[in-house]
Image (cartoon, rainbow, N blue to C red):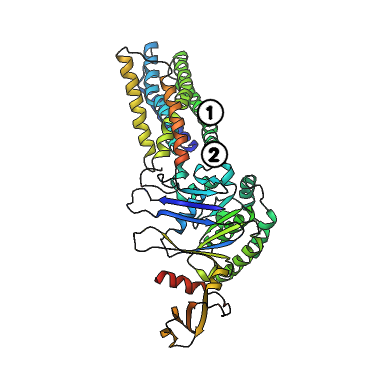
Amino acid sequence: MIDIKNLNYRYRGTEHPVFDDFSLQLAEGSIYGLLAPNGVGKSTLLCLIMGGLLPDKGNGGGVQVDGFDVARRSYEVLRLLYLLPEEMELPPVSLSKYVRAREPFYQDFSREVLADCLREFGLPADPDLGTLSMGQRKKVAISFALATRSKYLLLDEPTNGLDIASKSSFRRVVARHVGDGQTALLSTHQLADVDSLLDHVVVLGQKSEHAAVQLLLDSSVADIAARYTFELRSVGSDTDPDVLFCERRADGLHTLTHRHADDGETPVDLELIYKYLHKQ
Amino acid sequence: MFLWMLGALVAKTVVVMTWDWARSLSRSEEMSIAQREGAAWALQMLYLFPAFLICIGFWWVYSARLFEDVHRRASALDLFGLPASNGEKFLARLLSGTVFIALATIAAAVLGFTFDYLLLDRLADKVAVGDYLMQAARELPVVMLFTTPWFILPGLLLRRGGWLAGCVLTGVILLVANWLVAKDMWFPYWYYGVFGVLFLWLSYRVFCRAQAAGSSLLNV
């Protein structure tokens, strides 16, 4: 479990904290979506979870992964985590050379998973990393991340830079290779790319521009379906007092209401609930 | 680095050969031993001493940039996220970045000094030149060994100007040492070693607290 408790963090030289007494728990065995507008602190949170940034001391808060304090950056905790940052640097060497150098650090590294992901993305088995485009480097990095088979995979904006077909490939490789014992945390502001993968949703927000990050929603998709009803109605239904939020789209009026006990469950529209939470 | 040294050697060769040719045109009799020793001393001040400084200067800048990737977010995340302890990462970088490069620098310096010796042999007494060369070859590794941590620490701590801060730090340490000696005060032979060990330990502590993003100046 990733246990974030009373987390405080402020970038050096700035006045306003990014996180102020922030708490969140991520259980094992789920694919989490970390949703928030740009600049709120998704990448910062991932870096704090992985130990790239260190929480401010003071109230004893911090991040623990399976009981280990991440701030110590010990081998025991780092072997459980893998962060794929939004921007990464790959050395100008062949992929096989890169894998040979890195593979010993990951006990469960799987060359079969790597090969399968590269095939799915339409990449050669051993590309020269120095000659790849940004999108191709992203695909290699995603393939490598999945091949490490780390217990906790932190993917920061994984679909940025991918073309439309590659986004489908991304969904397929994640669904295929993130096993039951693994947890994936996908940070994104492009919900449509990943919503079909998610078991659990975490939505972050801010009350105002310089306010600390708040947890707006921490719920499984199943719980969301049990609590809310998502309907497509005709225009004019937005005056219904039961409607919590509505959005006019090309196919009609999408509405969000509380689910009554005798109502059947409806497919979850994560974009709608995300916008509802941020409107509040 | 090797190209720079090669270029410096070629430049020196050209200058020395030109000077030799100019002197041979104006010389009407054989040079005395004193004149030869004077010429040797002048050549070493002009060429060997700067070569010594170039090696040291390069080594100091290189030491300050040994952990340069910690200053860039992407490479810092890559390094911090690697499943190994802080101690293993620090030691691996320190050894691979210093021992091998130090050996290569010393080898290049010895080659350069030997080449200088062959040139200077044409103008000055062999024994005098040999003494200067051996002294330089002995002192270079000692200076590199003791001063490396004096540059690693500011290079790790500061996002910009680490090598410059290292030069200031070195200047302060040497000034204090010279003052102690000038005042006939107690000056232990392990003075430089203590600073080396202390700064190495501080560098490790800074590495443990370094972050992928920090203030514009400090890396912690």
Residues B189 and A172: in front is: A172
Above/below status of A36 relative to B49: below
Residue A67's spot in the image, x, y percent?
A: 56, 46
Chain under disc 2: B
**SS of the residue at dot 1?**
helix
Q: Which residue is mark 1?
A: B107
Residue B176's spot in the image, x, y percent?
A: 32, 22
Chain under disc 1: B
Residue B184's spot in the image, x, y percent?
A: 32, 11
Foreground label between 1 and 2: 2
Tell me the number on the disc at residue B28. Answer: none
Q: What residue sits 39% from the left and 63% below the top? A: A206
Instruction: Confirm whether circles 1 and 2 share one chain.
Output: yes
Above/below status of B107 relative to A278: above
Q: Amino acid at mark 1?
A: Ala
Q: Amino acid at mark 2?
A: Lys
Q: Which residue is mark 2?
A: B89
Residue B130's spot in the image, x, y percent?
A: 47, 17
Q: Residues within 10 Å of mark 2 (few under 14, many from 20)?
A: some
Q: Is residue A131 visible?
A: yes
Q: Is residue A161 visible?
A: no
Q: Residue furthest right?
A: A112
Distance from the alpha carbon under mark 1 to that under mark 2: 27 Å
Left of A173 or right of it: where is A56? left
